[in-house]
Amino acid sequence: MIESENVEALLAQLSTDIWTSRKYRSLDLPLETLRDLLEQELTKGRSGNAALQAVREKLHNIVAPYLGDPDYPAAAFMLDKAVQSGDSETIKAACHEIMATHASTKERIPWLETFYPQLWSVTGTPGSVLDLACGLHPFGLPWMGLPLETQYHAYDLHTPRIELISHFLQLLGRAPLAIVQDILVSPPKVQADVALFFKEAHRFEQRQKGCNRPFFEALNVRWLLVSLPAADLSGHHSMIDRQRSLMDSILTGLDWPVQELLIGNELVFCIRKI
Ligand SMILES: C[S@@+](CC[C@H](N)C(=O)[O-])C[C@H]1O[C@@H](n2cnc3c(N)ncnc32)[C@H](O)[C@@H]1O
């Protein structure tokens, strides 16, 4: 049993530390994330400084600043100019440049032309999408072939990323459905045709072992597409068997058909939920 006074005092200390630190202060991370991480550590029996230290280590892995970031104001300016030009190739070039600043999207760039047709050949072209833990993935929209009416909901806990995505959606004439939300603490309730959960399920397991299954169950979607890296960042070691056994352990006993796609370095599990 953890005492709520103790949690509140530690949470106040943690949030002041995080929100004023050079590393995190511009990110405006949700309080619900800090509270959840702290409560997890206290439940494990850690107290005081040991709990705070464990939360900082977890946060480093969740936010993953080492994967890269664009210069956000410069990226917004570049998008303004590109969209003003009215030239689709200029818009794609700006999106390329932004996606190349983060390891997850950078890896996908060589496969963009074929990536989405393969996904939609399984799910059908969606009328609504949830992009969960989206990172910079919404800058792939010019390759997705989705009509303007398609509702594109993007979620991340990194505020500058979400603000840039929201700006981009508006420039494209789309509804600005980009939201700062911790999707593990508060899984989106929005009904959608397809949810994309790319390159994050293995990190979710590190954050909280066993959390993926209840998270998948909570989503109100027909299709859940979960991708995991097929090889390590060096590209030398296959991770396919490891990722299959992770997905097997998450989905065991659930009556959801799964179809696999291997596209570039991404193994996509297409899960038919409903
Ligand atoms: C490895 S990147 C993957 C980005 C994107 N899905 C892709 O494949 O291009 C992980 C992203 O998930 C976000 N993230 C991690 N945990 C999250 C959570 N619980 N709720 C919302 N976003 C989260 C991080 O801020 C980061 O932008």
Image (spheres, rainbow, N blue to C red):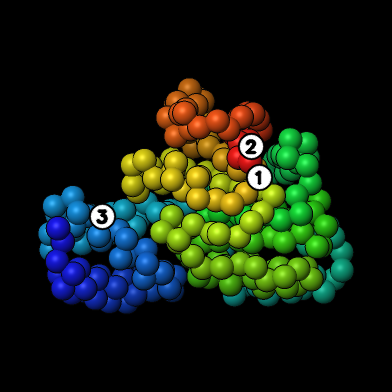
Give the amino acid at mark 2. Arg
Q: Which mark is residue 272?
A: 2
Give the residue displayed 71% in from the left and 56% down from the top: 128
Query: Which residue in the structure is indicated by mark 3?
Result: 40
Q: CA distance from mark 1 to mark 2?
A: 6 Å
Residue 240: image location, x then y, percent: 51, 25
Q: Nearer the viewer, mark 3 or mark 2?
A: 2
- Residue 70 versus residue 74 in the image, above or below: above
Q: Amino acid at mark 1?
A: Arg
Query: Quick check: marks 1 and 2 in contact, CB under 8 Å?
Result: yes
Residue 52 on image: x %, y %: 20, 62
Q: Residue at x 32, y 65 (%)?
A: 34
Q: Quadrant of the C terminus?
A: top right
Quadrant showing the N terminus = bottom left
Q: Give the mark toward the camera: 1 or 3.
A: 1
Q: Mark 1 sits on what residue?
A: 222
Q: Secondary structure at mark 3?
A: helix
Say left or right for 17 vs 196. left
